């Protein structure tokens, strides 16, 4: 059994989709990030970066003590290696999958996150920041569109992989990100194809009732006011 420490965010959806695709049994452990539950000692012991998601595998390959894993990309690789699925075993497909997984982790996710922050959550509208991140997200959609034009199927090649699962949840936010999806025909076709997968739909439905429609002041302070001192204070509470 796997414990999924989770909140319904794009990074959380990556892992719920993967678990559903693999058919692995898991227990949902909601961690309310708007109420600071990610700073509790028991969660920091699993995810020292105090971010969603994290897992604990109580039946790891080879047996032994439970294995905690944090960072969504690392979790996807771990689950692929555990199940032997969605990460190519031949050199070229494995490299391509990992390249595009890292592209999402280092590019699309952070840039879309900043774009969404300045568009939707920042109380002060800063034109330079809004333009900067909107243009970079647009560029990244162009990169993805060109890639899908070459592969004609999935991001890493002919086979569906964890690269698709990592990228899809961020593309799912295209409306909120104010991305003109119709400008990226190959991304649009790929997105619609993935939406037809039952496991993808189940994955994005996990915990959907948990997500609030709007941020209150407490959640805003918790999500956007974190510093190193926040972690030090959290650690003192566990002593």
Image (cartoon, grey):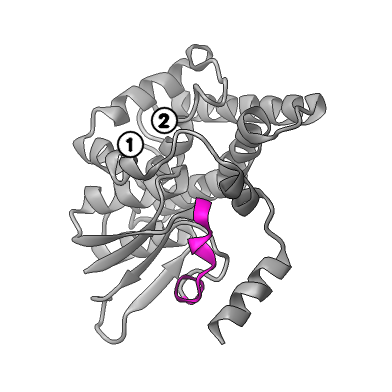
Residue at numbered disc 1 = 158
Residue 108 visible in the shown view: yes
Image label count = 2
For the C terminus, give its image quadrant: bottom right
Cα distance between the residues tagged 1 and 2: 7 Å
Residue at numbered disc 2 = 151
Image quarter for residue 130? Answer: top right
For the N terminus, give its image quadrant: bottom left
The residue segment tinted magenta is 34-45
| Residue 153 covered by magenta stretch | no
Farthest right residue in view: 128
| Residue 39 covered by magenta stretch | yes
Q: Nearer the viewer, residue 200 or 184?
A: 200
Q: Nearer the viewer, residue 117 or 37?
A: 37
The residue carrying pointer 1 sits among few (fewer than 14), some (14 to 19) or many (20 or more) residues within 10 Å by Cα, namely: few
What residue do we see at 41% from left, 53% from top? 94
Task: Determine whether 149 is above or below 51 in the image.
Answer: above
Label the magenta part by its dominant secondary structure: helix
Q: Secondary structure at mark 1?
A: loop
Residue 174 screen position, x and y as percent: 50, 25
Circle 1/circle 2 CB separation < 8 Å: yes
Horizontal side of residue 8 vs 134, given as left or right: left
Residue 140 screen position, x and y as percent: 60, 31
Q: Earlier in the sequence, mark 1 or mark 2?
A: 2
Farthest front residue in view: 217
């Amino acid at each position: 059994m796997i414990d999924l420490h989770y909140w319904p965010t794009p990074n959380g959806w990556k892992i719920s989709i993967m678990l559903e695709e693999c058919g692995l049994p898991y227990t949902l452990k909601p961690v309310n990030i708007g109420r600071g539950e990610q700073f509790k000692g028991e969660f920091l012991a699993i995810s020292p970066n105090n971010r969603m998601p994290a897992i604990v595998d109580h039946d790891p390959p080879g047996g032994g003590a439970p294995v905690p894993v944090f960072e969504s990309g690392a979790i996807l690789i771990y689950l692929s290696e555990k199940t032997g699925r969605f990460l190519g075993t031949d050199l070229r497909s494995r490299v391509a999958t990992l390249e595009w997984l890292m592209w999402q982790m280092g590019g699309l996710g952070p840039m879309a996150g900043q774009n969404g922050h300045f568009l939707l959550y920042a109380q002060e509208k800063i034109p330079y920041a809004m333009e900067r991140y909107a243009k970079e997200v647009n560029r990244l959609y162009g990169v993805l569109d060109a890639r899908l034009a070459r592969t004609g199927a999935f991001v890493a090649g002919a086979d569906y992989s964890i690269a698709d699962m990592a990228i899809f949840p961020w593309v799912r936010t295209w409306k909120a990100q104010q991305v003109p999806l119709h400008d990226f025909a190959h991304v649009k076709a790929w997105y619609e194809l993935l939406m037809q997968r039952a496991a993808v739909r189940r994955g994005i439905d996990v915990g959907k009732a948990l997500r609030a429609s709007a941020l209150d002041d407490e959640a805003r302070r918790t999500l956007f006011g974190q510093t190193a001192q926040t972690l030090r204070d959290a650690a003192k509470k566990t002593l």
